[in-house]
Image (cartoon, rainbow, N blue to C red):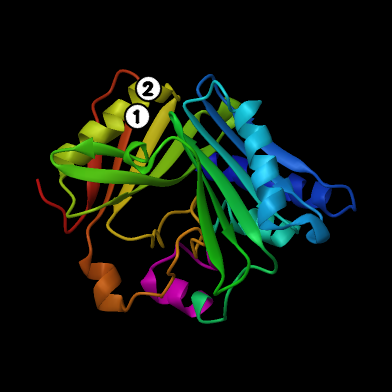
Amino acid sequence: MLQLIWFVASAALTLCALAGDRPERREQVTGKVLQRATTVPPVEMTPLRAEELGREFLAGPAAKKQLAKLSLSTNVFDFLKLEFHGHPAGGDYDYTNALAELKSGYPFRGPVARVLKLGRWAVLDYRGDATHFTEKVLEGTRDEAALSAGGSRYAVLDFELTGTNAFFLDVYLRSTSGLSAGDAASIARRLFEELAPGMLTAHFRTDTWFLEANYFPLLFPFTPDIPVPQAYQYLGRPDLSCKVEFGSRVACSGRNFQP
């Protein structure tokens, strides 16, 4: 709850700051993780400009970080939608109320882009609108773009740092096959030890629809195809979260996963 209260307050301050004409940014940083979100004037928001800003980010503040993200958008509404999908009126998101919101249409008002770095690998994703998407590897190779455990590969889709002093780290991963609680716990422990946050929660699915996670876009724009799943597809696929903090064992919970 404190995590949510902090983020809502931060988002409100960001909304006020971004209401002006001057581009603004929001940043959270720890020793090994950096997260930055920046507004870009609409006339400058092109794939080429996004790549220029991404390379500056990788060569500068993100150079010595193990995990880093630069989010780019042209307006405050998209700025916030990339970081947080929050709570609907009266409770949490589930498939039914998430689908109702998604049916209202493509949620972003302008182009959005994101540079994601994991170790020696970095990629630029750019979405111009609902149908136009491009991706370019800026550093490393695709073999370095995922973590491995138990014969499966887990691609890091996104992450979010929240809380005072960036205490909480949520990481979202997509498995190439089914989900094993043992493998997921191993990945969560590895990320916790390598990134050293106060508390880490690793979220796992076999698709990109983390509809019940607050700190993930309701519609994730940085993937080539974004068809909304049917209820039986969403609810029938594995969904698992593993939480770990200093001095404690990894605790995992979810549905439709293997031991």
Question: Any mark on residue 13, and which?
Answer: none
Question: Any mark on residue 191, and which?
Answer: 1
> Between residues 175 and 95, which one lies in front from this camera angle?
175
- Per the image, label 1 sits on a secondary structure element best described as helix
Instruction: Say which quarter of the image contains residue 104.
Output: bottom right
Numbered range of the magenta stretch:
88-101
Q: Is residue 89 magenta?
A: yes
Report if residue 133 is visible in the image.
yes
Q: Is residue 229 magenta?
A: no
> Between residues 242 and 133, which one lies in front from this camera angle?
133
Question: Local crowd at mark 1 within 10 Å, few (<14), some, or many (≥20)?
Answer: many
Which residue is pictured at 56% across the width and 34% down the height? Answer: 163
Q: Position of residue 96 (x, y in %)?
A: 39, 76
Q: How many marks?
A: 2
Which residue is pictured at 79% across the width and 60% down the height? Answer: 42
Instruction: Say which quarter of the image contains residue 182.
Output: top left
Query: Residues at badges 1 and 2 in contact (C-beta under 8 Å)?
Result: yes
Q: In the image, what residue type sits under mark 1?
A: Leu
Question: Local crowd at mark 2 within 10 Å, few (<14), some, or many (≥20)?
Answer: few
- Per the image, label 2 sits on a secondary structure element best described as helix
Q: In the image, what residue type sits under mark 2?
A: Glu
Q: Position of residue 175 (x, y in %)?
A: 26, 51
Which residue is pictured at 35% across the width and 20% down the height? Answer: 246
Report if residue 251 is visible in the image.
no
In three-dimensional space, the C-alpha distance between marks 1 and 2, rounded to whole angstroms, equals 5 Å
> Between residues 204 and 7, which one lies in front from this camera angle?
204
Left or right, 230 with reference to 223: left
Q: Which residue is mark 2?
A: 194
> The C terminus lies in which quarter of the figure?
top left
Q: Position of residue 210 (x, y in %)?
A: 39, 58
Left or right, 223 with reference to 131: left
Left or right, 189 with reference to 162: left
